[in-house]
Image (cartoon, rainbow, N blue to C red):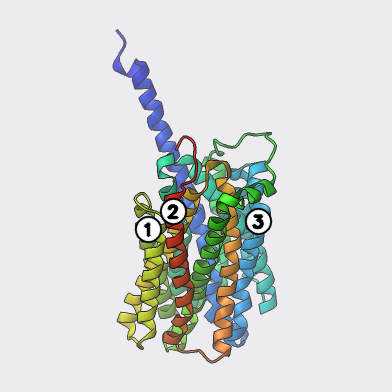
Amino acid sequence: MSSQSDTPAATGDAAGHRGTIRGWGSFVLILISLIVEGFDLQAANFAAPSIVEDFGIDRAEIGPLLSASLIGVLIGALTIGPLGDRFGRRTILIACCVAYGTLSLIAALAVNLPQLIVLRFLIGIGLGAVLPNALALAGELAPRRLLATATGLVGIGITFGGVVAGAVAAHYLPTHGWPALFVAGGVLPIAIALLLWLALPESPAFRPGAAPKAATAGVRAVLAPEFRGRTLAIWLIFALVLMVIYLLSGWIPLLIRDQGYSLAQASWIATGVHAGGVAGGVCASLLLARAQWKIVAIFAALAALSLLLLAVHNWGMGMLIALLLLVGFFSTGTQNGLNGSASATYPAAFRASGLGWALGLGRVGSILGPLAGSLAILLGLTAARHFFLIALLPLAIAALLALWLARRQRLAPPMDEGQ
């Protein structure tokens, strides 16, 4: 008589258990790769005060450095990212981690601002290709009913990477200066690339040797008459929300430093924004299982309210940190909700194109964010509490557009077979 463990059902259960463990392990690896990407995205923001002092430049000159990597991210997302369909998601992830890690190590040796700007631009190209492939791979591992939640959750890695960057900045900037952040930003992605090479499987949806789909087909699909209005609204929301997030993350450390806090204190306070963002991202992603665009609208509106509270009074350190935590919670929660809601808006046939183009074109906002900070300072808007007013209008528009999308999706949900 065969033992129970030899029965087909038991064998299937064991195989399913192993598959579940491997699936979760792969999800964690993707999450770690995005944490490392988030670290490198924020490295220049936290290093900015030290770079200004070390190079003896005016703080308004730092804007192009903060935007350089974001321009590279846009180019990388639209040009290198789609190569995952030809060469495999895993291959692109590993290659880009090695590439931008190596460039970050070189950036630590820069002797002037123009060198740093060029290197941060090149780093951004590698960073831009990581996110679409990571999101695609994570989505292919998730149950279809949890697609929006899974896409939102894995995006939290970007925000948590900012928390890690802030902690490293607070510890090492006072003693080792800005190069320490770029050294860490070089070692970490090279290490995760090795881990991905050893343990991350290729996407189950990737067929070796299959002819890649033309990128224009995806663009035509998301701009078809039945999707055109929603697509344009999604692109605008991504641009507005990313502009706010990068405006705040890029300039909060400098503004807090100007209020008399030390480099370490400025780094820790700015880290609070990212820490609040991790919690907000988790919360928003979990709520997406119940509602999608309505959650985006609620979080955007509450982010605007938090910024308004910051602007009406010159708060002490305790209240300042508390309000910044709320800003991080709701603004980053909005972004994670966007990732999940956008992925659920499009049918499976061109979901990757819809999400990829939204992320890529949304980077226009992330590029403009730090530059808007430079312009505001040049115009005399230097007080931190006045600075926060800049973000109110973009968030209000994003909330209204999200409400419109919620209504459109309720009236005409996308066809998605098998889901």
Q: Residues within 10 Å of mark 2 (few under 14, many from 20)?
A: many
> Which residue is the site of mark 3?
78
Q: Amino acid at mark 1?
A: Ala
Residue 387 image offset from top left, x and y in percent: 47, 84
Residue 201 appears in which quarter of the rendering?
top right
Label disc, if present, on residue 152 of the rendered structure: 2
Whole-Å distance between the Cαs marked 2 and 1? Answer: 8 Å
Disc tally is 3
238 is higher (above) or lower (below) than 319 = above
Q: Around disc 1, counting alpha carbons within 10 Å, would you say few (fewer than 14), some (14 to 19), or many (20 or more)?
A: many
Question: Does residue 152 appear left or right of residue 239 in this picture?
Answer: left
Q: Secondary structure at mark 2?
A: helix
Q: Earlier in the sequence, mark 1 or mark 3?
A: 3
Q: Residue at x 56, y 72 (%)?
A: 44
- Secondary structure found at label 1: helix
Near-viewer residue (121 or 412): 412
Locate residue 120 relative to residue 196 in the image: left or right: right
**Amino acid of disc 3:** Leu
Is tag 2's residue or tag 3's residue first in the polypeptide sequence? 3
Question: Which residue is drawn at the image coordinates 53% and 75% (left, top)?
Answer: 47
Q: Residue furthest bottom?
A: 380
Mark pair 2, 3: CA separation: 21 Å
Residue 53 visible? The answer is: no
Residue hosting label 1: 284
